[in-house]
Image (cartoon, helix red, strand yellow):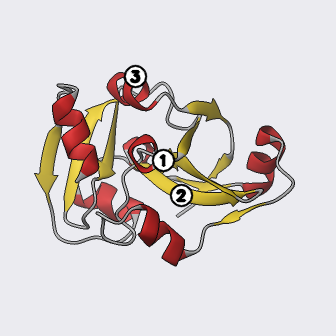
């Protein structure tokens, strides 16, 4: 997996844990006994013909109109699942990591994650999670930080 290789290559401290297979970011938060605010949920969007990786808290939903305004795009839509599978070809569908750089994507992080001390994310499979410091994530990925989500009520 590209992300674990990246973390090892850059000598970034991380914790890898295993859990029952889960298929949503909120369910992963529950399986890992973490509040959803720490779980980084990646969403691939197509903005004016190019693909971007948006990363937001599991407790939030993406606001495509807000994203469109902030990046100055004419159109923004969720990427087709087939395209996501092609981009993240070393990952199970729906278990993509919040790292776009290793996959040739610009990454935009939502302010909902900024200010936390760590993030938790799936690293390519539905039964494993990685925990790293937010500072290390931002240093490695250099995401653009914008506000493009709203809190999801459960």
**Residue on which disc 2 sits:** 43
Pointer 2: residues within 10 angstroms few (<14), some, or many (20+)?
Answer: many
Q: Secondary structure at mark 2?
A: strand
Residue 72 is situated, as x and y percent measured from the top left of the image, at: 83, 42
Q: Secondary structure at mark 1?
A: loop
Quadrant in which the N terminus is drawn: bottom left
Residue 131 visible, this angle: yes
Quarter of image, res 137 = top left
Q: Residue at x 45, y 53 (%)?
A: 41
Mark 3 or mark 2: name the one nearer the start of the chain.
2
**Residue on which disc 3 sits:** 139
**Label 2 to label 1: alpha-carbon separation:** 15 Å
Q: Is residue 77 left or right of residue 125?
A: right
Mark 3 or mark 1: name the one nearer the start of the chain.
1
39 in relation to 22, above or below: above
Residue 33 visible, this angle: no
In the rendered structure, find residue 104 and report the number of the disc placed on it: 1
Q: Secondary structure at mark 3?
A: helix
**Label 3 to label 1: alpha-carbon separation:** 17 Å
Pointer 1: residues within 10 angstroms few (<14), some, or many (20+)?
Answer: few
Q: Residue at x 21, y 44 (%)?
A: 4
Question: As drawn, which residue projects farthest toward the right?
Answer: 74
Mark 2 or mark 1: name the one nearer the start of the chain.
2
Q: Is residue 46 left or right of residue 113?
A: right
Q: Nearer the viewer, mark 3 or mark 1?
A: 1
94 in relation to 16, above or below: below
Q: Residue at x 26, y 34 (%)?
A: 132
**Label 3 to label 2: alpha-carbon separation:** 20 Å
Residue 107 is situated, as x and y percent measured from the top left of the image, at: 54, 41
67 in relation to 126, above or below: above
């Amino acid at each position: 997996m590209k992300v674990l290789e990246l973390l090892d290559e850059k000598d970034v401290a991380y914790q890898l844990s295993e859990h029952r297979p889960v298929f949503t970011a909120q369910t992963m938060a529950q399986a890992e006994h973490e509040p959803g605010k720490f779980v980084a949920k990646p969403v691939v969007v197509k903005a004016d013909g190019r693909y971007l990786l948006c990363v937001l808290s599991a407790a939030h939903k993406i606001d495509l109109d807000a994203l469109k305004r902030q990046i100055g795009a004419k159109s923004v839509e969720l990427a087709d699942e087939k395209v996501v599978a092609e981009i993240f070809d070393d990952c199970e569908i729906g278990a993509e990591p919040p790292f776009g750089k290793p996959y040739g994507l610009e990454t935009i992080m939502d302010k909902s994650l900024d200010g936390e001390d760590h993030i938790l994310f799936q690293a390519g499979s539905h039964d494993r999670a990685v925990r790293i410091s937010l500072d290390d994530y931002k240093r490695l990925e250099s995401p653009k930080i914008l506000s493009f989500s709203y809190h999801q009520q459960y």
